[in-house]
Image (tube, rainbow, N blue to C red):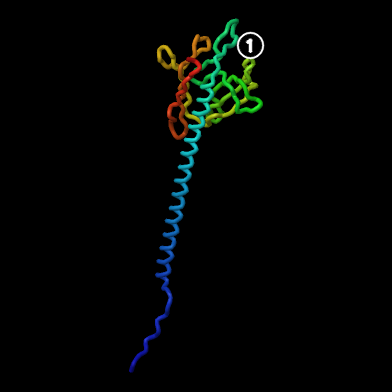
Amino acid sequence: MNQRRAPRQSGFTLIELLIAMAVTVAVVALLFAGYGLVGRMQERSQQLLDRSARMLQTSQWLTGKFDTLRLLKRQEGGGFVLFFGGNAAGAMWVAPLPERGMAGGLHVLRATPLRHEDGRVDLSIEALPYDGAAMTLDWSRALREVLVPDLRTLQWYYQDGVTGEWTQQWDASRASYPARVRLVLADARGAWPELVFALPRAR
């Protein structure tokens, strides 16, 4: 007597479903990990681009201001001294600021560290409208803008055009201007390439 076999039920067993779900979860996890990696790579690339753009902007701005430096003197202590001075923290000189529109013209510029209570240090530029050799340098009235934020290193150097030596102190009482100015910067990502500015008008 022939026994009829029971028809096999179509569909998946519980084990097959569990295996399929595990594979699906693994694929989804890999996809999300891949998207996250791509996102982090894009973010790092954007940060590098922003940093490079800030370096270029800083270099171009300071180059323009040192290229147009004015050889002026100011009254101090009954005599006259150069309208230029500098130390390891910053420098002061006179140059035009045409980018300020109607407020353009000659300004006394001071590059100085701006220190925050949380320890951050910015490189800021302060500007006072030039008002002659007898003007009072009241920096509380100065316009201020941050040129480079959040620095770890900020050091200025000045080259003597006669000896070629570099120093971190250039007194306004000197009889001459430095031949070059060097700026050493570092941010959270590391050191910048050194910025060196020639002072062509001071030669």
Q: Tell me if residue 191 comes above or below residue 203 in the rendering.
A: below
Q: Nearer the viewer, residue 180 or 137?
A: 180
Q: Nearer the viewer, residue 117 or 173?
A: 173
Label tally: 1
| x and y, in percent, of residue 148 in the image | 52, 30
Q: Residue furthest top?
A: 78
Q: Quadrant of residue 161?
A: top left
Q: Pointer 1: residues within 10 angstroms few (<14), some, or many (20+)?
A: few
Q: On the rendered structure, is 77 left or right of 37?
A: right
Q: Residue at x 54, y 19 (%)?
A: 69
Q: Residue at x 59, y 28 (%)?
A: 145
| x and y, in percent, of residue 12 in the image | 42, 73
> Residue type at mark 1?
Ala
Q: Residue furthest right?
A: 102
Q: Nearer the viewer, residue 33 or 141?
A: 141
Q: Residue furthest bottom?
A: 1
Q: Residue at x 44, y 17 (%)?
A: 159
Q: Tell me if residue 6 comes above or below residue 108 in the rendering.
A: below
Q: Secondary structure at mark 1?
A: loop
Q: Quadrant of the N terminus?
A: bottom left
Q: On the rendered structure, is 24 left or right of 134?
A: left
Q: Tell me if residue 156 comes above or below residue 190 in the rendering.
A: above
| x and y, in percent, of residue 194 in the image | 43, 26
Q: Tell me if residue 122 comes above or below residue 38 in the rendering.
A: above
| x and y, in percent, of residue 28 in the image | 45, 59
Q: What residue did someone put label 1 on?
A: 134
